[in-house]
Image (tube, grey):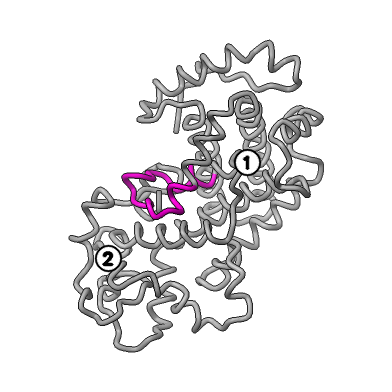
Amino acid sequence: MAFNSNYWLPLPISRRHFGTVKAEILQSLGTLASAGSFADASHFSVLSHFLNDIVVSFSEEAERSNPSSTLTHASEKAVESYFAIYHLLLCLAADNPSMVRKANHKILHFLSGHTSKTTCPNLGHLLVATLISDHPLTETLSVAIIKEAILRNVVWMLDPTGADMPELSYLEPSAISDYRLQNTFAASRTSYRLLMFCHLFCKTARGINTHNNKPLAHLRDDLFTTHGAPPRGLAPSMAREIRRIQSIDAFPPFLREMGVQRLQHAGESRVHGFFAGDGAGECGGGVFDVADGSDAGVGVEALEGAFGGGCGGVGGRGRGDGAD
């Protein structure tokens, strides 16, 4: 999401300052929604775009950064930006219960099975919803997001203009295929790395306090003590976590990073079974098992309609290798 520099969004640095600039903030968010041509022009949507764009931009920077010092600087800037917008989101949500209700509905709707791109256009926004929702980022929610992300990556994975791995459309007769697991991850590594970054930022932001059920107003006030900046020492800690995430290149460590604890004591061969069990033929070209092989032909044609013929990034930039 890019705007010209003539757009201005005030960021509250104290309770008194927020009261002074709140009307200007709301007006600015409306202007930004129009400038971005967002289908959903709500304040939550605009701030979600900001938060996701910070993560997407940082992810791209991390891909290009080899020296650790460069990555550390980029992570510090990303953490500062993320917390500034997160604090603004807290300020608005604490004053507007309907925003919290919307976040609750978004999460519960997704968990009830409404996971398609039509009903949930951007998985990154779903993660942002956990920042203000009464429903935290649980393992169940993480698993649902991961499965949907893999489904949305199928077109990119098989497409000659994408990852170009048509061999993955063949479903092996064996119950376990290490080749499928490794190459399915490799085909959309950027997408899964982006999900890990989103998960890390969301977990860090909401988890800065020991009690996740702390009222939003208290979370807001805690950040007023630092004028909306991240707590001292957080940026270096995040940089270490980010460097570790950069090295993840397979599903088992990815799942653990996303908070899936059920595989903690299982070997890699159990990961294939983790993705199975939700019904036959969910994903003919991905990691999912098909019970009897009768849906082995499910592939690009069957999925293009659901995914719009392409897959954008978690942040909605249309990178082609993501799961928005």
Q: Quadrant of residue 254?
A: bottom right
Which residue is at a point 39% across and 55% down the rendered structure image? 113
Which residue is at a point 43% across and 24% down the rendered structure image? 33
Of all residues, the one furthest to the bottom in this rendering is 174
The picture places residue 173, in percent across and down from the top left corner, at: 29, 88
Q: Which residues are magenta?
A: 108-127
Q: Secondary structure at mark 2?
A: helix
Q: Which mark is residue 275?
A: none
- Give the CA distance from mark 2 to mark 1: 33 Å
**308 is within the stretch colored magenta:** no
Q: Is residue 173 left or right of residue 234?
A: left
Of residue 234 and residue 137, the one placed in the foreground of this image is 137
Whichever of callouts 2 and 1 sits on the residue coming sooner in the sequence is: 1
Q: Secondary structure at mark 1?
A: helix
Q: Amino acid at mark 1?
A: Ala
Q: Is residue 91 left or right of residue 274?
A: right
Residue behind mark 2:
158
